[in-house]
Structure formats: structure tokens, C-alpha cells
Image: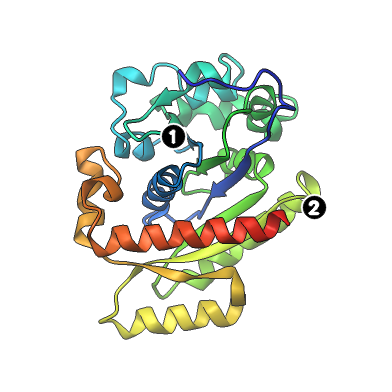
Amino acid sequence: MSEFGASPLDHMPRIIAVANQKGGVGKTTTTINLATAMAAVKKRVLLIDLDPQGNASTGLGIAQEDRRTNTYHVLIGEADLKDATLHTEIPGLDIVPSGVDLAGAEIELVDVEDREYCLRQAFMQRAGSYDYILIDCPPALGLLTINALVAAQAVLVPLQCEFFALEGISHLVRTVERVKQVFNPDLEIQGIVLTMFDSRNNLSDMVASDVREHFGDKVYNTVIPRNVRVSEAPSFGRPVLIYDMRCAGSKAYLHLASEVLRREKRLAV
């Protein structure tokens, strides 16, 4: 288990929700590899797997039998954050895994008072010793994602270079604005990262151009290419940065982490 600060006032980490209601956009892959790259530059990182599918937990090699205490128990108040936290094989990177019971959390939380604040309250109780908390959100704009947005200060949006990309992100932007107005005035979109970019495909260039025109400097310079090694890595329970550090996907995620941290440094000034 990890050591947490004794009180919520010791040191509050920066909390970033990685969100997109569309599935298959590289959200979990981005969360895992961004967290790994941050840990590689000596940041203390906690990854919260808030997706009932548990792909981030699998991608970091967490066995099913080690997920008996997970994000579900944290959300419903049955466990402290520290009780559900596991070390990964990557120094400086811990995870609160997902479990199959998380799928029922949205229904169970409906009648809970202040249900949108469950995750935020868990962080306030015990979140002291990390520099960053990254939340891998489910591919939906339901109560789990709302909890992540209420708990976070920033949202990072992976966006696949495909025809309907802009249409999908408009729903997320409206949700972020709504959460900001009603629950969390500090919430901002930290950045948008273009994923699954295929340089041989004119559509990828067109989408990238449209997104940059629409969102300006919110879009990271780094683009994540389509890469076989990135696709293979989760089946080995490893981030691509550990699986094959020299591949194009790994290099892209290292550049992305550098860009995210530079942006975070500017925001902190």
C-alpha cells in the first residue's frame, strides 16, 4: 500500500480527468502511458480506474484477485482511498483498480445525497502524497464521469482523428461547462490530444486541422500515431513505454507528457 499524507492539507495533488464519452479513442492507453511517463520523470502519480471495464487495471498488470477492494468501494464509502491503492511495477505509479461491481455504482449512487461529490470527498480525506492523480473515465457522460469532473481541476481529452470527432467533443465540452457552472468552478479543459493519427490518411490531416482551428492552443502539438506496438502492449499487462520504449507510440507519449507538464507549470504560475 502507498503512504498517504496525514491530512488533506498536507499537499493536494493536481487532479486530471481523462475523458471522452466515445469509446475506442485511446483514452485508457493515453491515461496509462501519460501516468507512466510522468512517473519516469520522478512525479508521484496515482491512477484511478473509474471505468467498469477495468482496462487501465489490466493494462498495468493488476490481476483480478488483487481488485477485491477497488474504486467501487471507495465511491460508496466502504473503503478509504489508501485501502484500495496498489503499487504497480513502475516506480512512482500507484493505481486504484476497477472491479466488476463498479458497473452497478451509477444505480446505487442515484439515491445518495451529494452523489456527484463522492470521489471528491474520497480525495479530500486521503490524497496527500501524490503530485498528480489521473482518472480514467468510462466512455459515457454518466454519474461516474460526473464524479471525476467534480473531483478534478482539469480535463484532458483524447480525440481520435476520424470524421465524427468534433461532433462528439461538443457534447463533452457542454458537459464540462455545465459541471463548472453547477459543481466545480475550478474545472478547465487542460488540453486535447489527437490520437490514432494516420499520416497516410488525408482524413487524419483534415480532422487535425479542423480541431486545431476550432480549439486553438488547447490542442497539444503532439499527436499519437496509429502504432501496432501501442495496440499490443495491454495484452502483456504493460504500458507501451515499458513494452517497447523505442517505438513511435512510446516516443509520442513521452513528448505528450513533456507538453502536459510544461502546460501544468504555466498554469501553476
**Residue 61 drawn at (x, y percent):** 28, 32
Residue bearing mark 2: 181
Q: Which of 161 and 139 is in front in this view?
A: 161
x, y percentage for residue 234?
Answer: 26, 44
Q: Which residue is drawn at 41% across and 75% down?
A: 163
Q: Do the residues labelled 2 and 1 touch (CB within 8 Å)?
A: no
- Residue count near mark 1 (Cα–Cα under 10 Å), binned few <14, some 14–19, many ≥20: many
Left or right position of 196 against 185: left
Using the rendered image of the protein, determine whether residue 25 is visible from the camera's viewpoint.
Answer: no
Indicate the secondary structure of the residue bearing disc 1.
loop
Q: Is residue 129 left or right of residue 95?
A: right
Image coords of residue 148 (percent x, y): 60, 41
Q: Is residue 106 above or below residue 82?
A: below
- In screen coordinates, is 246 left or right of 261? left
Identify which amino acid the numbered label 2 is placed on. Gln
Question: Where does the C terminus fall, quadrant-wise?
Answer: bottom right
Asked if residue 87 lies left or right of residue 232, the reply is right
Circle on res. 84:
none
Lower sequence index among marks 2 and 1? 1
Looking at the image, is 64 positioned above or below residue 249? Answer: above
Disc 1 residue type? Gly
- Residue under the image location 58 percent in, 17 percent down: 80
How far, Cα to Cα, is label 2 from label 1? 34 Å
Mark yes or no: residue 68 visible.
yes
Residue at image coords 58%, 39%: 131
- Nearest the eye: 147 or 135: 135
Q: Nearer the viewer's eye, disc 2 or disc 1?
A: 1
The residue pinned by badge 1 equals 92
Q: Is mark 2 on a helix, strand or loop?
A: helix
Mark 2 burial class by Cα count in 10 Å: few <14, some 14-19, many 20+: few
